[in-house]
Image (tube, grey):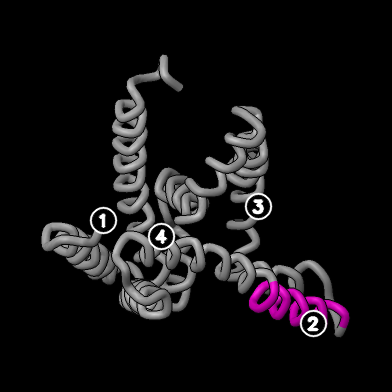
Amino acid sequence: MPFETLDYLVVAGYVVLMIVVAWIAKTRGQETLDDFFAGGKNLPWWLVGVSMVATTFAADTPLAITGLVAKQGIAGNWFWWNWMISGVVTVFIYAKLWKRADVLTDVEFIELRYGGKPASFLRGFRALYFAFPFNCIIMGWVTVGMAKILTVVTGADQWIAILVLYGLIAIYIAISGLWGVIVTDFVQFILAMIGTIALAYFAVDHVGGLAEL
């Protein structure tokens, strides 16, 4: 079904909302380097927690999880449910230690923990490894997932969809840094959950209820 005027208005409203949210967060994200890259190291725990969850809720998530459940049943969810353990440990143990270390990045911590040329080499290697092969692969599959959805739903060219998405992201990151990312994650998570619950309801209703599944 092609997009109609109302659909485009909803998308435009969403884009405007993200820019407005980032602009509101601007005052907290541009005062210092720590503010821009680390939210001033003073982000509320619940906001960071929602952002962590929202980050795993990408466009490819419903597609991947649906495939897992279809092939392996509900037990297939343990593929990602087990991440809860590392999340809890990170929040209640590592977060406090990280704040005490007073570093901006994890690679900076390497030279704090170790010393000499080996530490500098490890820092550089880790920075390059995560910047290119690791994160590029993750960003690649998430981007492809989103681009495929937009191509099917809107009929737009895949590369145009990708450029528009990355352009929007670059704008609100440049405006407010990590604060903008965290706050927009929070808003996006709420919208995503509302949409997911609504989709589940209408999908089940379409097939005649749970008894027909």
Main SS of the magenta segment? helix
Kindly tell me whether residue 138 is visible in this rendering. yes
Q: Mark 1 points at which residue?
A: 1
Q: Which of marks 1 and 4 is in front?
A: 1
Residue 29, magenta (yes or no): no
Mark sitting earlier along the chain (3/4): 3
Magenta highlight range: 118-133
**Callout 3–callout 2 Cβ contact below 8 Å:** no
Q: Evaluate if marks 2 and 4 touch, with contact meaning CB atoms under 8 Å apart.
A: no
How crowded is the residue under tag 1: few (<14 C-alpha within 10 Å), some, or many (20+)? Answer: few
The residue shown at (65%, 61%) is 101
Circle 4: element type: helix
Marks 1/4 in contact by CB < 8 Å: the verdict is no
Give x and y (percent) for residue 127: 69, 77
**C-alpha gap between disc 2 and disc 1:** 55 Å
Q: Is 175 placed left or right of 94 in the picture?
A: left
- Residue plotted at (75% across, 77% down): 123
Mark 1 against mark 3, which lies toward the viewer?
A: 1
Q: What residue is shown with label 2?
A: 120
* Mark with earlier residue (1, 4): 1
Identify residue type, mark 4.
Ile
Residue under pointer 3: 97
Would you name the residue on which mark 4 appears?
Answer: 149
Evaluate whether residue 170 shows in this view. Answer: no
